[in-house]
Amino acid sequence: MEKQPVVWFNNEIVPWENANVHLLSHGMSRGSGIFEVFGTHKNGDHTYAFRMDKHLERLENTLRLLSMELKYSMDEIKAAVAQITRENNAGRGMVKIMAFWGEQAIVNLVLDSKLDVAIFPIPVDVYRPKGHGGPITACFSKWRKLHPETVPVQAKACANYLNGYLIRKDAVARGFDLGLNVGTDGFVAEGSVESVFIVKDGVIKTPPLGRILASVTRDSILRVVEKEGLPVMETHLEKEDIYTADEMFTCHTGNKVEPIRKFEDRELPAPGPVTEKIKTWMDNVIGFKDDRYSDWFQKLF
């Protein structure tokens, strides 16, 4: 019988189905959980994490922004990731780190205890089932991006993704794969879990940080494109920029480059020539075919 997956939960290895918290826990009833997620990739007989150090830096930033503290150090988290991926013989997939207050919070809104931690290895076929793949469709959502003065939008907080849920639900109800949101400042922000890029007159453009999540995949693309010598700009994008783009693509942990073939009622080349180059470069990076980025991978086992 196939071995059932296990989870690293507060320094113990527990069966997947036992990684639970009380319904009245602060993380559940107050929506205060935070998380981080990054890819894992096989190279030969070994499994590597993709830019785990950068992802853990973002986790530390989330903790600072929300005035939270983990029960474990980042070195302990790294060791736990290696342990649980080895226990599950994990290959291509993701690691999701959940941090939360597991204690009940019937009345208390603010707790001063340290966060519990659970670490889940997730195989690739869970988030990328058979038949999934290829260019996608997108639209503008009726929902605006959260304003950064209401909550820190650069924190990878579970509560922030209610905004993303509404944006995706709105898009799917209209027959599209995903929706893009516009900030309260009127500029294009991002998708539910995606960063957005456009190509216009050969120039690659993406919204700047400040009102969007500091995506590690987005950062990786920017670094690769700059090294390859293509013109790229982090700049405010208006709706009109999206409507007149020559090419469009999104990116996130699960898909490093996802071409958009249709935006609203407008057909686009997917992938267009520039997007295809970027996709090839990123495929080479995560396929261990470009030694210039070997330091982006941390060996797990």
Image (cartoon, grey):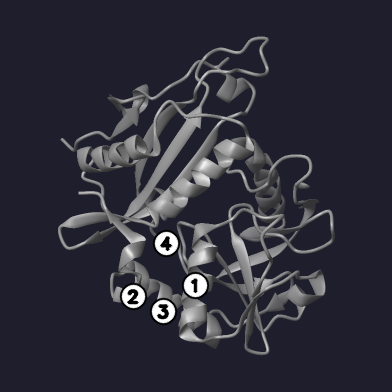
User: What quarter of the picture does the N terminus occupy?
Assistant: top left
Q: Which residue is depicted at the point 28% across and 70% down?
A: 288
Of the two numbered discs 3 and 2 in the rendering, the one whose residue sits closer to the viewer: 2
* Residue 290 appearing in the image: no
Question: Badge 2: few (under 14), some or many (20 or more) residues near its Cα, within 10 Å?
Answer: few
- Residue indicated by mark 3: 280
* Residue 205 appearing in the image: yes
Amino acid type, residue under disc 3 in the picture: Thr
Q: Are marks 4 and 2 in contact (CB under 8 Å)?
A: no
Mark toward the start of the polypeptide (3 vs 4): 4
Mark toward the start of the polypeptide (4 vs 2): 4
Vertically, is 116 above or below 186?
A: above
Question: Badge 3: few (under 14), some or many (20 or more) residues near its Cα, within 10 Å?
Answer: few
- Residue indicated by mark 2: 292
- Residue indicated by mark 4: 131
- Residue indicated by mark 1: 223
* Gap in angstroms between the C-alphas marked 4 and 2: 32 Å
At mark 2, the secondary structure is helix
Amino acid type, residue under disc 2 in the picture: Arg
* Gap in angstroms between the C-alphas marked 3 and 2: 15 Å
* Gap in angstroms between the C-alphas marked 3 and 4: 21 Å
Residue nearest the observer in this picture, 264 or 276: 276
At mark 4, the secondary structure is loop
At mark 1, the secondary structure is helix
